[in-house]
Image (cartoon, helix red, strand yellow):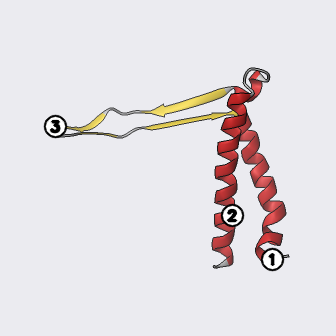
């Protein structure tokens, strides 16, 4: 595998793990630490694009994130820049 591809895959795995575990920990700790569970949502729903008797086609985007996810993503970037050169080089 190419070095650039390894780095991209490593960053993608770190980001997905950070988003998943940040959401999990933010949801679980929302009772004790409310500020970690504070979330914000963005929705883009323009309505129905194609509407016929046979099918209906609608496009929309819903994005939600909480404080814990943001902290975990920042931590993932820090971990990536500290460990990627050593991990990819095999040291």
**Residue placed most toward the observer, 13 or 35:** 13
Tag 3 secondary structure? loop
Q: On the picture, is 31 further left or further right than 12?
A: right
Q: Are marks 1 and 3 in contact (CB under 8 Å)?
A: no
**Residue placed most toward the observer, 25 or 42:** 25
**Residue placed most toward the observer, 47 or 90:** 90
The quadrant of the image that shows the N terminus is bottom right
Res 13 → quadrant: bottom right
Rendering coords of residue 75 (x, y %): 79, 48
* Residue at image point 69% right, 68% down: 7
Q: Which residue is mark 1?
A: 90
Q: Earlier in the sequence, mark 2 or mark 1?
A: 2
Q: Which residue is mark 2?
A: 10
Tag 1 secondary structure? loop
Q: Earlier in the sequence, mark 1 or mark 3?
A: 3
Q: Which residue is mark 3?
A: 52
* Residue at image point 68% right, 60% down: 11
Q: On the picture, is 28 further left or further right than 44?
A: right
Q: Nearer the viewer, mark 2 or mark 3?
A: 2
């Amino acid at each position: 595998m190419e070095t650039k591809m390894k780095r991209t895959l490593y960053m993608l795995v770190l980001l997905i793990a950070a988003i998943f575990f940040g959401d999990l920990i933010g949801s679980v700790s929302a009772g004790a630490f409310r500020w970690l569970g504070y979330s914000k949502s963005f929705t883009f729903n323009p309505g129905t694009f194609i509407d016929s008797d046979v099918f209906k086609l609608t496009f929309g985007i819903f994005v939600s994130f909480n404080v814990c996810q943001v902290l975990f993503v920042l931590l993932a970037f820090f971990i990536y820049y500290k460990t990627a050169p050593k991990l990819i080089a095999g040291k």
